[in-house]
Image (cartoon, rainbow, N blue to C red):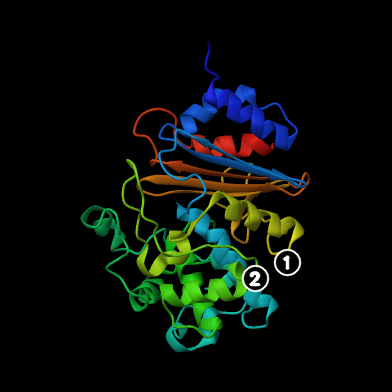
Amino acid sequence: MFRRDPARAALTDLGGVLGRDLTHLRPLLRAALPGGGVIAVARGGRQLSAPLRLPGAADGPFELASVSKPFTAALAAELVRAGQLDWDAPLSALGGPLRGLPRSVTAWRLTTHTAGLPTHPARAAVTVLTRYHDPYGGMDARAVLDSVRRWAGPPGRFRYSNLGAGTLALAGAVAAGEPCSAAGYGRALRRFVTGPLNLHVTLDPPRLSGPAGPPTGFGPLAGAGGLFASPGDLLAFGRAHLHGPLGDHWVAAQRPPGLPAGLEVTAGWLARGPLRWHDGVARHARAGLAFHAGTGAVAAILARGGEPLLGRRAALSALLLRLLE
C-alpha cells in the first residue's frame, strides 16, 4: 500500500478550509518546515490545524518571536481607545521612567518602526555572542530607555527595531498603571487584550520536548518577541481584527521611506493590499501570522528550528502569504 504524502494531505485539508487548491505549494511547505511544525487556517466558521513532523503536542504554546509585536500594537491600540495613551503624543508625557525620552518617540512611530531607533540596543552587538539564547537578558527597563535616549535619531524612515517594539511594551505597561517591566507588560496585555479575547498567551516558556532547543529570552524587550501561544490562539487573535472587538489600528497603511518595494506598514503589521502579516525568527523557532481583510481568512505557521544555514531562507513568510493570496 502507498502512504499518503503528509505534505499533500495537509495542503489538501487546509485548502478545503480556504476554498483553494494549495497542493502546488508542497515544495515551499517542505522548505518552510524542515524540522516540523503546525499550519493552522480559519475562514468563515471553519478552522483547521495541520501538524507536520512534530514530536510534541500540536496544540501547546509555541514561541512567537516577533509575532509578539502585533500583540504589543494591539495593547497600545486598546490603551488609546481607553484614553490612557495617545498615538501621536511624546511617550515622555507619560512621565515616570519615560520622562526624558526624545519628543519624537511616539507610540505610532514605535509600532510602525519609524521612530528613528536602531534595530537593537548597542550592547546586543556583543551579547548576541556572549548570551546567545538571551541577548537582552542582562538589561533592565532602565537600560532599555537609556538606550532610546542615547540612540534615537531623526524619525520618519522605516527601520525595523526590536528596541522600539520593546520600548512600546514598557510604555504600555506604564500607561496601564503597571510597573515598567516585562512582567508589567504581561499584566497589561492580559487585562486589555488577551483576557477579553479569552486567549492563553503568556510570557512563560513552555517545557519543550523533542529536539527543540531552549526558547530565546527577550528580557525587558519582551514586547518585541517574548510571547508564547498556541495555533488556535493565534487564529483567534487574527480573527479578532476582522470580526471581533479589536479596533481598526491595523487598517490605515503607510509607506515610509526605507520599506522594500511593494510593502506598506501599519500598527504592528506589514501590509500589501488587503493582507496584514508578521513573521518572526528565534534561535530554534519561527512563526508567522497573517489575515486577509477581503476574504476573512487567517493563517498561522509555527515551526521548529530557526532559519536554515543552507537552502531557502524566509520560506515560512513566503508560504504564509501564498496560503492567503
Mark 2 Cα-neighbour bin, 10 Å: few <14, some 14–19, many ≥20: few
Q: Is residue 321 left or right of residue 116?
A: right
Q: Nearer the viewer, residue 21 or 221?
A: 21
Q: Is residue 113 visible?
A: no
Residue visible at 49% across and 88% down?
95
In the picture shown, does residue 308 fall above or below 171?
above
The Cα–Cα distance between marks 1 and 2, rounded to whole angstroms, is 9 Å
Tag 1 residue: 245
Quarter holding residue 309: top left
Q: Secondary structure at mark 1?
A: loop
Q: Is residue 281 visible?
A: yes
Choose mark 1 or mark 2, whichever is in front: 2
Residue visible at 45% across and 59% down?
225
In the picture shown, does residue 306 fall above or below 235?
above
Q: Is residue 19 left or right of residue 147?
A: right
In the picture shown, does residue 259 fall above or below 97?
above
Question: Residue 279: x percent and y percent?
Answer: 52, 48
Q: Nearer the viewer, residue 152 or 110?
A: 110
Dot 1 and dot 2 residues touching (CB under 8 Å): yes
Q: Nearer the viewer, residue 222 or 187?
A: 187
Tag 2 residue: 196
Disc 2 marks a residue whose amino acid type is: Pro
